[in-house]
Image (cartoon, coloured by chain):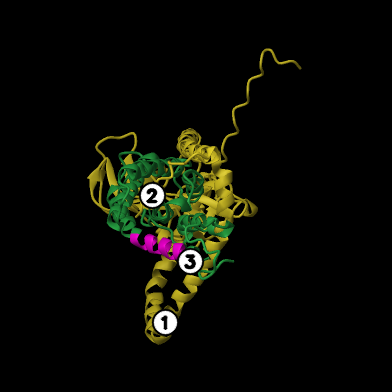
Amino acid sequence: MSTRNSVDYKPFEPKVAGGRARAIPWLTVMAGSLITIVPIVATIPILPPFGFVMLLAWRLLARYALRPWAAAPLGLFDDLLSGQPLGSAVLLWSLAFVVIDMIEQRLVFRDFWQDWLIASGGIACCALGGRFLAVRVGTHVDTVLLAQIVITMMLFPLAARIVAMIERRRAQE
Amino acid sequence: MAPARDRRTGFSRRRQYGVFVGYVLAVAGAAVGAALLVMSTFNPPAFSAARMGIAGVTTPVSSGLAWAVGGIAAIPEAIGQYFFVKQENIALRRERDQTRALLMRARVIAYDNRRLRSLLHVRDRIADPVVSARLVSSSASSGRRFALLNAGRWSGVGQGMAVRGPDGLVGRVIETGPNAARVMLLTDVDSIVPIRRTRDGLPAIAVGRGDGMIDVRSVNATNVRFKAGDLFVTSGVGGLYSPGIPVARVMQAGADSVMARTFAHPDTLDFAVVERSFMSVPPPRPIAAQPDARP
């Protein structure tokens, strides 16, 4: 172990994340998906899709924490729990990753507000997409859906704090 | 945030291919998602085994959480009851005196009813309960309205069974796992229940709206007037739900299609009773013998 004061110290050596550090982003996103097991029987879609918010926070704030293909298996796990038709989160989350990649090519220096804006766009698009994949057009879920989208957007800073906290711990390890 | 330039991979072939494969897999994930979506749209129960496998793990956790939350919430309630027990006692005594006459009349009516029915030789099918269990969690982040029941195949719960609460119909079982079952609530947009009006037996259907209410629509008649406060119970048509389970009360007067509130409030529900289907589902049509099949 080379400390900061020794001759062997290489400040720019890339840190290789261990197995546990690799698993933590996956586990936090899956824990977010598990929000649907809280013991309430809701008559309106009121809980935010917290797994997706965690996924966006990891993707936007810690780019290399998740592989580019991680959205599909995590989406599958979310689909198994959320009650949406299986495959909707696999599709929408993968598309969100691809779109964020395309944005990132053009907008390389971002601050938190831009991250939040991108995340808000992703949340709105995925919520609307999920609604049209799950429920017919003529049903009366749209007002509640708007409320759900706004609540979910407001949760992004919280997810960002969680991701930042974990990243700091991960960097120290 | 610093620019992320991981597409500049340098001269390492291994790294170049690694990055390329990563992006190919990312796009392939979307394609797989689309394929899964098509499969689950045309065959909704296709992945029920996987779903119910996970539900089998999460349901005991939800049950434990519900128990803990209920236990904590019961403490202030118990304290309140301790202080108001005297007033409650007086009120209950008064209520008992008031309802005694009503009870006698109801007993007489029930006896008459039984006698007249036996005269008419009406053969009632009495739905026998399979199990009583708790609804522990729901698809609260989705537009669909599903709830998880903490009893499954091990307790005899089967697909298509009706689920009722103490106040009225809750929904029906659509997927079963070993120790959990997925219940489609009345308010789900795909739920359709045949009902009739208690006042005159007018047939109608209850269709979920997705926002916690249901639509009551008249069948085989046009320009039907619904009054606010009309009560609807299941009619037993179709054989899935036994007749006479309370379903909904109309909220606003209207014609042909009106909004109604369900009697059972799943969000305040503690116990639900699973009942066997009123009439058993007919067996699948026998496959005709192939002409070229050899004996």
Q: Badge 3: few (under 14), some or many (20 or more) residues near its Cα, within 10 Å?
A: few
Which of the two marks, 3 or 1, is nearer to us in this view? 3
Looking at the magenta stretch, what is its main secondary structure?
helix
Decide if residue B202 is in sight here.
no
Q: Secondary structure at mark 3?
A: helix
Instruction: Examine the structure image and report whether residue A55 is included in the region drawn in magenta.
Output: no
Q: Are marks 2 and 1 on the same chain?
A: yes
Number of marks: 3
Decide if residue B108 is in sight here.
yes
Q: Badge 1: few (under 14), some or many (20 or more) residues near its Cα, within 10 Å?
A: few
In the displayed image of the protein, which residue is found farthest to the front?
A: A7
Colour of chain A in the rendered structure image: green
Q: Which mark is residue A162?
A: none
Indicate the chain on which mark 1 is placed.
B
Indicate the chain on which mark 3 is placed.
A
Residue B136 x, y percent position in the rendering: 50, 60
Disc 1 residue type? Gln
Q: Is residue A5 above or below residue B285?
A: below
Disc 2 residue type? Thr
Residue B117 x, y percent position in the rendering: 50, 49
Residue A18 falls left or right of residue B87: right
Q: Which chain is yellow?
A: B
Segment tinted magenta in the rendering: A157-169
In this figure, which residue is indicated by the disc labeled 1? B81
Q: Which mark is residue B187?
A: 2
In this figure, which residue is indicated by the disc labeled 3? A169
Q: Nearer the viewer, residue A80 or B10?
A: B10
Q: Are marks 2 and 3 on the same chain?
A: no
Residue A23 x, y percent position in the rendering: 54, 56
Q: Nearer the viewer, residue A172 or B244?
A: A172
